[in-house]
Image (spheres, grey):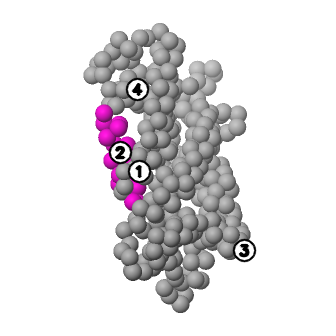
Amino acid sequence: MAIMDRIGRGKDTSKNPSDSPNAGAETTEDSRGSHVAMPLTEHLRELRNRLFKSGIAIVAGMVLGWIYYAEIFAWISRPFTNVIAEAQADGKDVTLALTGVADPFVLQIQVSAVAGLVLSAPVWLYQLWRFVTPGLHRNERRWAIGFVVIATPLFAAGITLAYVVMPLGLEILLGFTPENVENIVSVDKYLSFFLRTVLVFGVGFLTPLFIVLLNFAGILSGKRLVSWWRWIIFIVFLFSAVATPTGDPINLALLAGPILILVLVAVGISLLNDRRRARKRGIDFDAYGDDELSPLDDELPE
């Protein structure tokens, strides 16, 4: 009888996985660390709910942006208005203007939309986080939390630096306006210039963070980064030259300098992490050359 039971259990375990009622379902990890099957329809329903909540938050942020449109636009245009006063003192006529009948209404919608995305960022980032985390392991969740915690102040620092140096770049560009020539700058073009500048500076400040993540994932070693120092400097200055709207050496240095400092810190962290990992496994990674194979971790680094 016991033999028949074993044979029966053996038949059950040899079934094709596609015959299971949860076939095609994605495996996710619950709060206790065990994996549970989640059907595709549940994922789609979850995505719909997250998008709906994010959309409501964005609309609410747009309403606030519409109400405080005057204050927000004053903050955005302040770098330009400061330059206008200096240009007029030099005898140059520079004006920020709207050139269409419907442009004031379109501009307010654009500013409100940008404000809505920024103000609702905590909500839609949280919804994105809740949608992604069920498919992550616990150590991957720690990495993601660390990424968000570090990326937020770095991105904010990049935006702050862009806002500080923007008047200098505008002064250089508008300084080429000939005398007795009125320079009428369209507001929508200035808004595009403003958004591009702050986003480029913010993304540039995130580059060192990606370097550290690649090192913690075991993809890029600190020693290899040190051997690439010439290329790193070249790429940073090339990115700064392309990304800087003015293209002048002053703004280029103002963007490239902080990024290089942050990259240097990232390389130092990578070297320390390599040594920590080597001590943990009892392996001297410094004994291996850049072109030699070294033992890889069998599991994800902690």
Residue of label 3? 67
On the image, the x and y values in percent for residue 247 come to 36, 57
- Mark 1 → mark 2, Cα distance in angstroms: 12 Å
- Sequence-wise, the earlier of marks 3 and 2 is 3
In three-dimensional space, the C-alpha distance between marks 3 and 2, rounded to whole angstroms, equals 41 Å
Residue type of the residue flagged with mark 2: Phe
User: Dot 1: what SS?
Assistant: helix
CB of mark 4 within 8 Å of CB of mark 2?
Answer: no
- Is residue 209 visible to the viewer in this orientation of the structure? yes
Q: Position of residue 99 (x, y in %)?
A: 48, 85
Q: Residue at x 67, y 39 (%)?
A: 30
Above or below, 261 against 278 in this view is below
Q: CA distance from mark 1 to mark 3?
A: 37 Å
Provide the residue designation for mark 1: 250
Q: Would you say 223 lies left or right of 148 here?
A: left
Q: Residues within 10 Å of mark 3 (few under 14, many from 20)?
A: few
What residue is shown at x 59% (from left), y 40% (from top)? 150
Question: Which residues make up the magenta segment?
Answer: 230-246
**Lower sequence index among marks 3 and 4:** 3
* 1 or 3: tag closer to the N-terminus: 3
Q: Is residue 4 visible?
A: no
CB atoms of marks 1 and 4 within 8 Å: no
Q: Residue furthest top?
A: 282
Residue 177 lies in magenta, yes or no? no
Indicate left or right for 178 with 166 as reference: left
Verify whether residue 245 appears in magenta: yes
Q: Which residue is mark 2?
A: 237
CA neighbours of label 4 inside 10 A, class few (<14), some (14 to 19), many (20+) = many
Q: Quadrant of residue 13?
A: top right
Does label 1 or label 4 sit earlier along the sequence? Answer: 4
Q: Closer to the camera: disc 3 or disc 4?
A: 3
